[in-house]
Amino acid sequence: AISSRWIVRLAPRSLVCNTGIRIMSSQSPFIRDKAYIGGKWVAATNGGTFEVKNPATGEHLGVVPDMTESDAVFAIKTANEAFQSWKSTLARERTLLLRRLDQLMHEHKDSLAKLISLEMGKPIKEAKGEIMYAASMLEWFAEESRRIYGDVIAAPTKSKRLVVIKQPLGVASLITPWNFPCAMITRKAAAALAAGCTVVVKPSEDTPYSALALAQLTEEAGFPAGVFNVITSSRSNAAALGHVMCTHPMSASISFTGSTEVGKILMREAAEGIKRVALELGGHAPFIVFESADIDAAVVGAMMAKFRNCGQACVGANRFLIHSSIYDKFCSKLADAMKSQLVIGDSMDESVTIGPLINERAVEKVEKHIKDAVDNGASIVVGGDRNSRGNNYINPTLLRDVKPSMLMCQEETFGPVAPLIKFDTEEEAVSIANDTRSGLAGYFYTTNLLQAWRVAEALECGLVGINEGLVSTVESPFQGFKESGIGSEASKYGIEEYLEKKTICFGGL
Ligand code: NAD
């Protein structure tokens, strides 16, 4: 049963773990070297570790456990044990714990943001924004916990009554990416915990510290041991952990955010045990500017939709479709905005807007896409090369005369590159926009009311921004069409991923 710990208010800045050891690091009080299972800070059973580096400097940040199958099995069994009492806690108890966690995230906002910047290079101002977005999930689902409703249904005979109730699924296995290392965890975990599920989180090998910081805060908030668990592994052990999370009989569901390629592997594995699957996968968002658009507003939206997180966002605009009558004007205004507004530099500097890419592999992919476009007739308007800071810095790039057949229009670039494609008719723009297996976000600018409805309905994607470059909020559902995913996160729908419906037929009346 839930202990009275959850009503005890701990000193807000206490960073003392349950073993009584104060965590010390010159770079962040949240950097630690153990995973978190059953309320204990644990090493990998085989003693393995892997290194975590700062992508901006290449600097060593620390090591964390490189866990294997047996650790994942132990975490799932532990979470299942905790589920036996967590599932029957009062909704209000879960509400209070989630609120307390939300409050702790606000109190530690600056340290948590710094941690994100250290492990993935996100500019500090954006990292603070991510912490606020991540915390908003806790606040939202704290309330949703008390709004899990069922149904009373008209029975087919007089002797029966029909009722539908909702119950938590069990252990929710969560696998998350590096690009929003904190928010992609809370968007899942807050809903799961609110529903009455316990969770096992496997964060990206690039960003384990944000997940471990969240574990530390759940402990401080007073969540019972085993309700929130974090297992860490290197890339080479990720598939083994993923296999256990998808197939172990005590893992009730798998929720994954990451690449479409890995999502497909996990879905196949989950099929074996008919697990509940939720997938938030890659995107390839079109950004269309029609002839009636307010061009200045479209440039503001484009800057937001493209350069946030250095172009490493699943909802980031990847293909800019510009009407031929305004193509040159839009191109020169976007070039001016890029040159005057984007500041490359040290992620810890509040004025910096462009940090490094996550690793060398990401830089090489961006370079390959730019080369392919240029080799096939596109021209570089801004950037196009690596920044002199070295490491993983690439200059924000604007390309014109891009064709839909080029590599960067066929696959997610995941970098600060804006390719401009020319179109003449609405039908042509919609057809190019939908000509992809992805369907996460889509944006367009127009002042034509009827066109706004037509195009919003015609775009094959789960999120549409009309005259708007930022579409994710906690209040509205986040989901992909086609190969961008299955299921919704955030909003009133998010909690459904972690609930089962049960029909109760009461007879003999
Ligand atoms: P990734 O698929 O490489 O890795 C995601 C996670 O899966 C990591 O934790 C990784 O360790 C793990 N993983 C890798 N191989 C695995 C395997 N075989 N089995 C089990 N787990 C495995 O993705 P990434 O590079 O971390 O993130 C970038 C991708 O995520 C982009 O495609 C982006 O569009 C997508 N993304 C989607 C959303 C969304 O909500 N739709 C949000 C953020 C990122």
Image: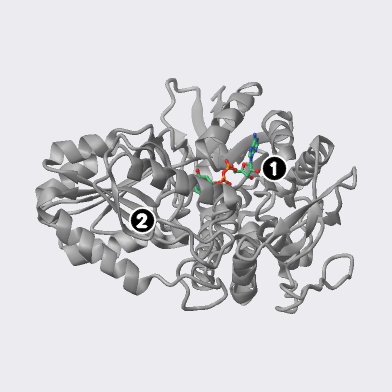
Q: Is the Cβ of the residue at disc 2 closer than 8 Å to that at disc 1?
A: no
Q: Which residue is mark 1?
A: 235
Residue 506: name its quadrant: top right
Q: Which residue is mark 2?
A: 471
Q: Position of residue 362 (x, y in %)?
A: 54, 49
Left or right: 64, with 302 as reference point = right
From where the camera sits, is residue 96 visible?
yes
For image coordinates 73% across by 28% down, the residue present is 249
Mark 1 lies within 8 Å of ligand 1 (Cβ measured): yes
Mark 2: amino acid:
Val
For image coordinates 41% across by 58% down, the residue present is 473
Residue situated in front as seen by the camera: 501 or 134: 134
How far, Cα to Cα, is label 2 from label 1? Answer: 31 Å
Q: Position of residue 323 (x, y in %)?
A: 15, 49
Mark 1: amino acid:
Arg
- Secondary structure at numbered mark 1: helix
Q: Position of residue 344 (x, y in %)?
A: 47, 70
Label 1 crowd bin: few (<14), some (14–19), many (20+), radius 10 Å? few
Residue situated in front as seen by the camera: 239 or 256: 239
Q: Position of residue 355 (x, y in %)?
A: 51, 65
Q: Name the quadrant of the C terminus.
A: top right
Quarter of the displayed picture in which ligand 1 can be seen: top right
